[in-house]
Image: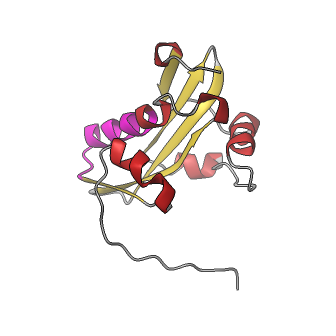
Amino acid sequence: MTTRLADVELRLGDAVWGRELQDLFDVAWPDGTRAPSGRVLDASLCWVTARVRGALVGFVNVATDGGAHAFVLDTTVHPDHRRAGLGVRLVEAGVAEARRRGVEWVHVDFEPHLEAFYAACGFGPSSAGLLHLPPA
């Protein structure tokens, strides 16, 4: 399926949690990644959805520390709609809303194979620390 960006509607704060969002995650993240819950989204700075003819095909969440920093999380695009620029548009829309709300720094963590994607979204390289906390 070829996605034309002109056919995509981006929505800020779309009422999306529940089965619809999990269905997108199930097809986009075959490893069983869980979609963020309504409780998680309620604590977020913002989130952006992408819809084609009403169907949910993309999502990104932007969390915040309540101050100058925000964090891009859960960038998700349905496999049938990838490689058309939709993921970049989602991230750019989330970053633009963060800027509008006074955020100064936007962070993102990603696996090495996504470096070019996030560079296309405007992110530069940085050094960061990461601590994995497995269940006790």
Q: Is residue 129 left or right of residue 56?
A: left
Residue 113 versus residue 59 in the image, above or below = below
x, y percent for residue 39: 61, 51
Residue 48 versus residue 68 in the image, above or below = above
- Magenta region, mostly helix, strand or loop? helix
x, y percent for residue 79: 65, 36
Q: Is residue 133 left or right of residue 26?
A: left
Instruction: Please check the rendered image and state whether residue 91 is part of the magenta-colored stretch, yes or no.
Output: yes
x, y percent for residue 126: 30, 66
Q: Is residue 110 visible?
A: no
Residue shown at 63% from the left, 33% from the top: 16
Q: Nearer the viewer, residue 60 or 40?
A: 60
Q: Is residue 115 left or right of residue 113?
A: left
Q: How is the image coloured?
A: secondary structure
Q: Quadrant of the N terminus?
A: top right
Q: Is residue 98 left or right of residue 51?
A: left
Residue shown at 66% from the left, 39% from the top: 17
**Quadrant housing residue 25:** top right
Magenta range: 90-104
**Quadrant housing residue 66:** bottom left
x, y percent for residue 9: 51, 19
